[in-house]
Amino acid sequence: SSSIQSFENALEFTCKVCDSFMPSYLPILRRRWLLPFTSQQRHWQLIRRGRYVEFNLLYDRGVKFGLVPGGRTEAVLVSCPPLVAWDYNYQPPKGGEEERLSAILKSPKVWC
C-alpha cells in the first residue's frame, strides 16, 4: 500500500541522513574546535541558547504539553542547555557577524 511505501521511503531517507551526519560533521568539528573565541562571542552563544529555551518553553507544543500539571516538567528542563543568558532587548554590535546572523534569522530564505 502507499502508506507502507511512504514509510519505507521516509525510513530510507532517515537512514541516509544518519549515515552521512558523522562523516560530514566530524571534519568540521576537527577543523574548528580549537579556534579561539572572545568573551563577546561566548556571550552571543549564551544569548542564542537563551532564545532556544525561550522558543521551547513558549511555543513548542510538545514542550508546553510537558509543562502542564502532571506533565514531565523535569524532562523538559533537563533538555535545556546548561548555560544560557538573557539580556533584555539585546542588540548585537553593529557591523559584526552577530548582526548579520540576526538579519538572516529574522528573514529566512524560502527554499521551495
Image: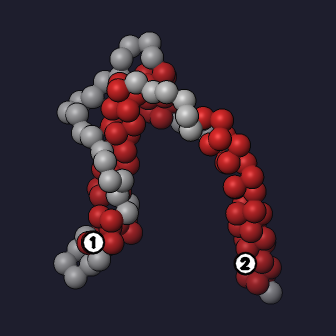
- Residue closest to the eye, 16 or 107: 16
Q: Residue at x 67, y 48 (%)?
A: 25
Q: Callout 2: helix, strand or loop?
A: helix
Residue 42 found in image quarter: top left
Give the side of residue 62 with respect to residue 23, left or right: left
**Quadrant where the image shows the N terminus:** bottom right
Residue 110 found in image quarter: top right
Task: For label 2, count other residues whose C-alpha is less than 10 Å away and answer few (under 14), some (14-19) or many (20+).
Answer: few
Q: Residue at x 70, y 63 (%)?
A: 18
Callout 1, which amino acid? Glu
Horizontal and vertical percent position of residue 96: 45, 17
- Residue closest to the eye, 17 or 10: 17
Q: Which residue is mark 2?
A: 7
**Numbered label attached to residue 111:** none
**Numbered label attached to residue 74:** 1
Question: Of all residues shown, which one is farthest toward the top?
Answer: 95
- Residue closest to the eye, 64 or 33: 33
Horizontal and vertical percent position of residue 59: 34, 56
Give the side of residue 26 with respect to residue 77, left or right: right
Q: Is residue 72 above or below residue 98?
A: below
CA gap, disc 1 to disc 2?
32 Å
Horizontal and vertical percent position of residue 51: 34, 44
Give the side of residue 48 with respect to residue 4, left or right: left
How many labels sit on residues?
Answer: 2
Is the residue under label 2 in contact with that under label 1 (CB below 8 Å)? Answer: no
Q: Callout 1: helix, strand or loop?
A: helix
Callout 2, which amino acid? Phe
Task: Tell me the mark number nearer the camera, choosing from 1 and 2.
Answer: 1
In this view of the protein, can residue 103 be seen by the observer?
A: no
Horizontal and vertical percent position of residue 78: 33, 65
In this view of the protein, can residue 90 be seen by the observer?
A: yes
Lower sequence index among marks 1 and 2? 2
